[in-house]
Amino acid sequence: MVDLLVKNGKVVFPDCTIEADIAVENGKIVAIGLRGSMPRAEETIDARGKYVLPGGIDPHTHIANPFMGKSPDEDFFIATKATAKGGTTTIIDFAIQKKGKTPMQEVLDRRAVADDKVVIDYSLHPCVTNPTPENLGQLKELIDYGLPSFKLFLVYRKEGLMVDDGALMKVFELTKAYGGLVGLHAENVGMIEYLIDEALKKGNTSAIYHALTRPPITEAEAVNKAIYLANYYNAPYYNFHLSIKKGVDLCRKARNTGRPIYAETCTHYLVNTIDDLRRENGINFICTPPLRTKEDQNALWEGLADGSLSLVSSDHCYFTSEQKKTGKESFDKVPNGMPGHEFRMPILFSEGVVKGRISVNRFSEITSTNAAKIFGIYPQKGIIRVGSDADIVIIDPKLEKKISAEDSLYGMDWCPAEGLNVKGWPVVTISKGKVIWDGGFRGKAGEGKFLKRVLDPELFKYPIA
Ligand SMILES: [Zn+2]
């Protein structure tokens, strides 16, 4: 007798999809087999006609992270509950070093607000914003602590997050020595500040100028520099929220020569465009990098399909319309960011698999497996395999409904993909063997655990995901 049996579903593996049953005990997958060959279970779920996939991994969320003077109206409980509803069973959030704290203190402070609240497993990327020798001296300690991936900001000088190219070199040197992964918010701060100043001088303050003052060159230059530096140090590199065609081309070229260059794009770049900034509520769509053109969007889909891009994150960062409005006088005052983790999986399934852009196996890679491999939680997470955590999502490919902020567990007052027709929704989410969503929430705060991660040494040699 096992704890749980998921029967009759189409189980998605990296290289095939097979009708099979999955047995779960003590939070782990203990057997995968053909119908009728499995032990009896305390609880059985019939997944006939549905896909059974590894639970989603979203390696880029900003939960309850104050920014530009505003604090999102959420905590790790409501946020991870909504994540679970959306079919995601692991998130990697950020510990963005604040003034007067060390990166390690920031990690401990984030854990203090998250550990008792999370309903799914989670981890953090430390962000160094004040690269003093003392703070950089903690990189090794952070890696040993189980947080081997870092994010640095090349922008947000005024907001106090930016580091310069010298610090970036130093971080490459140190992570090279200790075995860490450098990730960047790659945009060119000098170009953007110049273009914003020019726009404001001319009185160009509406939302569309957010995108027009961050044209593709400002991102392409920074992505190019990052890849160049990674090559110089013979180190791996992770590009957060890639949004442009030129960026896809740069990653493709680097990976074609065997370099371990990894990039994610985000859900909103795949369904929203620069035109959303021209809407009446255009300021809501302000995020960085900005929304781009249809041509960029097509290139991102191509990059996901051909393996130039590794995965899709949400970059969830929720501000209400009211909070966004504090910047209504000028685009540069609007708190950046959009909500997204709750709808990442259904949007990608519908726009990707149902529309024929990617296979269901590739969907599984870009929503789960590749994040696990890159960030050092594979094969504990990211795959349906005997011995792995029983983090499982069941998607009903026939269920069809429109995205609506009203459906969100948050009670969001707006949503970037509002009105998008989505076919294929997560209907059951299982975290470590326990059903935590099946149309209603069955999890508990604090049942998620903080994950200590260890990078795969192969990650440093060639693209593993
Ligand atoms: Zn972000």
Image (cartoon, helix red, strand yellow):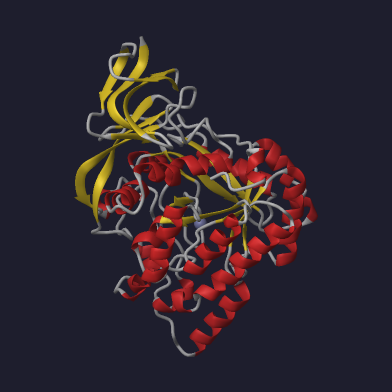
- The residue nearer to you, when weighing 194 against 130, is 194
Q: Residue at x 71, y 43 (%)?
A: 179
Query: How many numbered callouts?
Result: 0
Q: Quadrant of residue 293?
A: bottom left
What percent of the width, then of the height, locates residue 346? 31, 47
- Using residue 28 as the reference point, say whether residue 284 is left or right of it: left
On the question of residue 319 being in view, the answer is no
* Residue 426 percent coordinates (x, y): 30, 40
As drawn, which residue projects farthest toward the top? 1
Image x and y of residue 431, in percent: 41, 30
Snapshot quadrant of residue 281: bottom left
Asked if residue 55 lies left or right of residue 171, the reply is left
**Res. 420 image quadrant:** bottom left
Is 341 located above or below residue 294 in the figure? above
* Coordinates of residue 370 in the picture (x, y in percent): 50, 43
At horizontal 64% and vertical 61% (from top left) the residue drawn is 227
User: Outermost residue, bottom direction?
Assistant: 202
Residue in the foreground of this view, choosing between 288 and 106: 288
Vertical relation: 129 (above or below) 427: below
The residue sitting at the right extreme is 133
The quadrant of the picture occupied by the N terminus is top left
Left or right of residue 287, residue 251 in this image: right
Residue sitting nearer the eye, 61 or 222? 222
